[in-house]
């Protein structure tokens, strides 16, 4: 019993401390002390992440004109909660205002699939699949036990459609979970990053192109090109660009 009381007390105190920190960070933000708010929010991240926490941090970084970090935080907020409309709208706003390519790496159909599936988190898709499965069982029961021919037809065809919906929802849930765990997407962090045609510091002829800070790229390969310096280079896909190499230190994985 004493252990239970101690655990409850610790939980209450932890919640109180977290609430006080959030209040302090929000107060600093509204007082335009953005650097102070950033320090508090980042200290909270050490205790645990959340979509709202990354959203708040992204707003602070935007106010300090650190566009790459603001975009990174909004992207991480959406990874944790794909239904965070505030993070989605702010991300779109920052990209448009900063004139950063918003197109996702990949083909048109692939990006339509990503955007559609990305509207819900993996947990939300799994919940939808569970609900669909229960309704499908009810439709099967209607087909088996109902005397009315009309209800039996509704149950038969409804069960078939619901089975397709169930499989699609489960596929979306697994896809979203794979995206979250893949760590293949990253944000370019310097204001301007030079990409190379080969995995090493490029000569003038080897420069592929430059990417603006805040651009999202997809990592497709990585190599360590210099064993002494241990420089890791990522081969990346960028919007409307050919694949090229960028220093890993010039990116932050989402």
Image: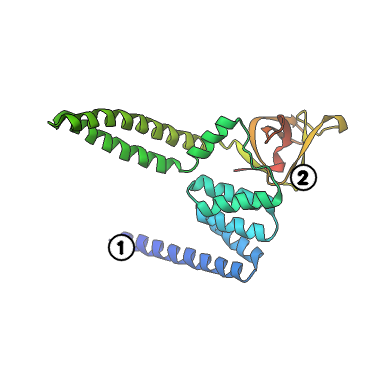
Circle 2 SS class: strand
Give the label on residue 192, or none. Answer: 2
Residue 231 visible within the image:
no
User: Could you tell which of marks 1 and 2 lies nearer the N-terminus?
Assistant: 1
Q: Position of residue 172 (x, y in %)?
A: 44, 35
Q: Looking at the image, which residue is at 61% across and 64% down?
A: 37
Q: Is residue 155 above or below residue 119?
A: above
Q: Is residue 247 left or right of residue 38?
A: right
Q: Quadrant of the C terminus?
A: top right
Q: Where is residue 103 in the image (x, y as percent from the top left)?
A: 63, 39
Residue under pointer 1: 2
Nearer to the camera, 169 or 123: 169
Q: In this view, does 103 lie to the left or right of 161?
A: right
Residue 172 visible within the image:
yes
Q: Which residue lies furthest to the left in this view?
A: 147
Q: How many marks?
A: 2
* Distance from the alpha carbon under mark 1 to that under mark 2: 58 Å
Circle 1 SS class: helix
Location of residue 123 (image quadrant): top left
Q: Residues within 10 Å of mark 1 (few under 14, many from 20)?
A: few
Q: How crowded is mark 2: few (under 14 residues within 10 Å), some or many (20 or more)?
A: some
Q: Which residue lies furthest to the right in this view?
A: 204
Q: Is residue 74 left or right of residue 1?
A: right
Q: Position of residue 225 (x, y in %)?
A: 75, 30
Q: Looking at the image, which residue is at 70% across and 57% down?
A: 65
Nearer to the camera, 233 or 193: 193
Q: Quadrant of the N terminus?
A: bottom left
Q: In this view, does 203 lie above or below 91?
A: above
């Amino acid at each position: 019993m004493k252990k239970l009381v101690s655990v409850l007390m610790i939980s209450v105190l932890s919640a109180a401390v977290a609430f006080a920190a959030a209040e302090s960070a929000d107060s600093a933000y509204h007082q335009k002390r953005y650097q102070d708010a950033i320090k508090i929010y980042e200290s909270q991240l050490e205790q645990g992440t959340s979509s709202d926490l990354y959203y708040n941090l992204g707003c602070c970084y935007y106010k300090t004109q650190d566009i790459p970090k603001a975009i990174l935080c909004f992207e991480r907020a959406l990874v944790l909660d794909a239904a965070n409309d505030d993070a989605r709208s702010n991300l779109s706003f920052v990209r448009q205002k900063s004139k950063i390519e918003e197109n996702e790496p990949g083909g048109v159909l692939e990006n339509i699939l990503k955007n559609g599936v990305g509207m819900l988190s993996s947990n939300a898709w799994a919940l939808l699949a569970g609900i669909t499965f229960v309704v499908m069982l009810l439709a099967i029961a209607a087909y088996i036990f109902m005397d009315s021919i009309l209800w039996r037809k509704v149950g038969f065809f409804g069960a078939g459609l619901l089975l397709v919906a169930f499989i699609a929802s489960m596929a979306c849930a697994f896809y979203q979970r794979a995206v979250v765990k893949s760590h293949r997407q990253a944000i370019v962090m310097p204001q301007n990053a030079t990409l190379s045609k080969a995995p090493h510091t490029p000569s003038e002829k080897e420069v592929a192109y430059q990417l603006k800070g805040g651009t999202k790229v997809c990592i497709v390969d990585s190599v360590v090109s210099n064993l002494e310096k241990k420089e890791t280079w990522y081969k990346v896909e960028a919007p409307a660009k050919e694949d090229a190499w960028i220093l890993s230190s010039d990116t932050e994985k989402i």
